[in-house]
Image (spheres, grey):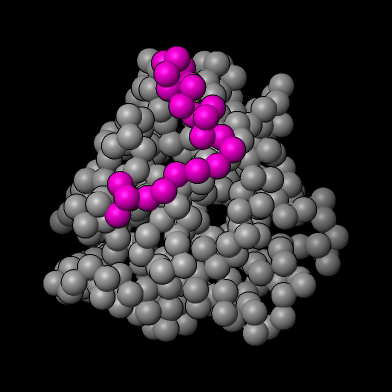
Amino acid sequence: MESGDLSLKDRVQNALARAILGAALFLPYRMRVATVGLLNAYVVAPLAGWNRRIDNNLIYALPELDARARRKIARRVADNMGRSLIEIYSGAEFIARTKASTIDGPGLEALKAARAAARPIVLVTAHLGNYDAVRGKLSREGYPMAALYRPMKNTAFNAHYIKAISTIAQPVYPTDARGITSLVKHLKNGGVIGIVADVASTKAPLLKYFGKPAHTPLSAGEWALKYDAEIIPIFGIRDPDGFRFRIHVGSPLTGESAEEMMQAYNDAVEKIVRAHPDQWFWIHRRWKLAPWAKDLLSEGEQPPE
């Protein structure tokens, strides 16, 4: 779609987004991040119906939580999402904070060893904390990382969003055939790729996430097996102060099949989410199922819409 073909709705949405982001960028960094976080938590999320979706997902995955705990998590999730968006648009100021991030975890030595041996590396992360903090940190620590992004339907917004994420680290490729080919070529040549894999693709097989059936793409595991790449889960966890990050490197994923590897990935994500439930993007329809998959469940087991 060309810019002249944009619908009125797309034009209005992009204009509002540009106005809010542009105004926020005039604020000092810490005030900017906190303000957009609060705006998202107390204005955008309620109006968009996100709080209801977050609550439904929490009831489904963590039924032991009471209503008060779920409301608290919902506010913090929306706050984190707002912070993450304005951080991505903050360029050098955000990059400086990612560079200052600590990095730890049981998989750190394996990551270093794979890089020293020029072995291909597949890093699998999740919509938690600010996942772009991982790219910002590692790309400046000797791990030039190629990543995928999902193009937005609003092409006007997509144009400046791509520019923003490209500032953090390059290259970034769209999730189309040409982009995926470029990503795989980068991996085959001994490079590092990053994939946000906690998405529901109804064409993917069913694995388990929080003990519930969830479509889970196998691409990361398939590429790791095909190109003898080390596959490692990694997460950009937001510190309690709301501005700094800790990069946590999980143990390498193992298995004789892509299914086994990606189940291990789901388990790793679940462990991190249970430790930081207010940082995962519960707004996503992670348990969205294809019609045939829904038919396998009883009425009481059906996931939230």
Whether residue 268 is visible to the viewer of this picture, yes or no, is yes
Name the residue rendered at 51%, 34% in the picture. 108
Q: Give the x, y percent position of residue 195.
A: 47, 39
Whether residue 1 is visible to the viewer of this picture, yes or no, is no
- Asked where in the image residue 180 lies, by quadrant, the reply is top left
Q: Give the x, y percent position of residue 292.
A: 74, 47
**Residue stretch rendered in magenta on the structure:** 97-120
Name the residue rendered at 77%, 53% in the picture. 211
Name the residue rendered at 50%, 78% in the picture. 75
- Left or right placement of residue 141 versus residue 184 in this view: left
Q: Is residue 62 above or below residue 139?
A: below
Is 26 covered by the magenta stretch?
no
Q: Is residue 263 above or below residue 38?
A: above
Location of the C terminus (image quadrant):
bottom right
- Asked where in the image residue 266 lies, by quadrant, the reply is top right
Q: Give the x, y percent position of residue 15.
A: 20, 70
